[in-house]
Image (tube, helix red, strand yellow):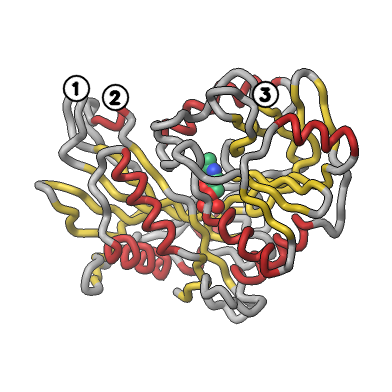
Amino acid sequence: METTANSLVTVEKSKTSKIDQVDFDNLSFGSTFSDHMLVCDYKNGAWENPKVVPYGPVSLDPSAKIFHYGQSIFEGMKAYKDTEDSTWLFRPLDNHKRLNISAKRLAIPEIPENYFMEGLKTLLKVDEKWIPKNEGSSMYIRPFIFASGNGFHASPANEYKFMICLAPSGAYFSGKVKVLIEEKYSRSANGGVGFAKAGGNYAGQFYPTQLAVEKGYNQVIWTDDNTHEYIEEAGAMNIFVRINDTLITGPTSDRILDGITRKSIIEIAKDENINVEVRKLTVSEVVTAAKDGSLKEMFGAGTAAVISPISGFGYKETDYDLPELKEGFASLLKKRITDIQYNKAEDKFGWRYKL
Ligand code: PLP
Ligand code: COI
């Protein structure tokens, strides 16, 4: 193993590479991992010694608090290649800020910006040849922090690991996305952790989502926990609805993740002179619009999902289909945001970040 270091991050290179075993033309989402990962430990009250090391298992004591009390948070980002072979990130400092918002809520120590950014950049440079160049593919980046400290006492751990893994990935959804509007289960509640990217938020969704999948849907659209009358967000995406020519999305709250794609789409849509309303959206309004034909589009927005048009939704045992629009808001907004991400168009918002 060859060991080098920049001022902050140590690099221990793997002797071999798995890259020749990867079919970059047929990448699924998040199931192939690059040769290296970043690991940084929190011990004795401080984050120390971020290092890039060969990708591989992590050894933990069985009493590590992550296993028992679920202190775990993560982020989702992507790196994109342009036609000149340059690598770009999209609003990475926003992911760092959000990771620390999640950290605070889960009583996890915040990670300093230079550890996050230098660790990320060093790892991406080491595994740069892993970043897919094919249209629609990208390097999915998963920064995460979990409690590695030991003990069954139900209190925050005294040791943590911050890690970043890289997964060259294709599309998150393989086909049409059909959703079920949830009437019984809840993803989050007032005063809870819904706004945080906490691992447990996803675990809590799996069972209701399995029930929806058994009925032929791909994702659940979560409604508010109190009345189930308001549309909140989907399992891994924020939700936009187009009624006539108005684009509507719910306001963020302590129950909803403040999506970076969501806020970018709102800005791009305004720039396109689309009438955008950020307001509470009722299920009954969407059902009425589906019945009278004014519901033109629904789509999910997220880093993994990019912009995923919704082909129909189920609610109270009835299915509602949406028209297939080739040139709707979803396709326009997807082109505008991906053109910025892949450095194909001007970035008037200053969101692109060169590696
Ligand atoms: N909502 C949830 C629950 C998510 O997991 C995600 C994915 O990150 C999003 C929304 C979209 O957020 P972003 O656009 O920052 O990826
Ligand atoms: C992302 O879009 O980055 C997410 O975190 C969604 C994930 C649950 C796949």
Residue shown at 24% from the left, 71% from the top:
5
Residue shown at 68% from the left, 28% from the top:
181
Q: Residues within 10 Å of mark 3 (few under 14, many from 20)?
A: many
Q: Residues within 10 Å of mark 2 (few under 14, many from 20)?
A: some
The kind of secondary structure element at disc 3 is helix
Q: Position of residue 246 (x, y in %)?
A: 76, 53
Q: Position of residue 118 (x, y in %)?
A: 32, 67
Q: Is 114 or 299 nearer to us in this picture? A: 299
Report the number of numbered marks: 3
Q: Residues within 10 Å of mark 1 (few under 14, many from 20)?
A: few
Q: Quadrant of residue 186?
A: top right
Residue to which mark 2 is pinned: 68
Q: Position of residue 351 (x, y in %)?
A: 52, 70
Asked whether the viewer can see residue 28, the reply is no
Relative to 251, say whether 330 is above or below: below
Q: CA distance from mark 3 to mark 1?
A: 35 Å
Q: CA distance from mark 2 to mark 1?
A: 7 Å
Q: Position of residue 94 (x, y in %)?
A: 43, 60
Residue to which mark 1 is pinned: 152
Q: Looking at the picture, which amino acid does disc 1 mark? A: Phe
Relative to 129, say whether 230 is above or below: above
Residue shown at 84% from the left, 40% from the top:
322
Q: Looking at the picture, which amino acid does disc 3 mark? A: Ala
User: N-terminal of the two: label 3 or label 1?
Assistant: 1
State left or right for residue 131 relative to residue 322. left
Residue shown at 53% from the left, 77% from the top:
86
Which numbered circle lies on residue 212?
3
Q: Looking at the picture, which amino acid does disc 2 mark? A: His
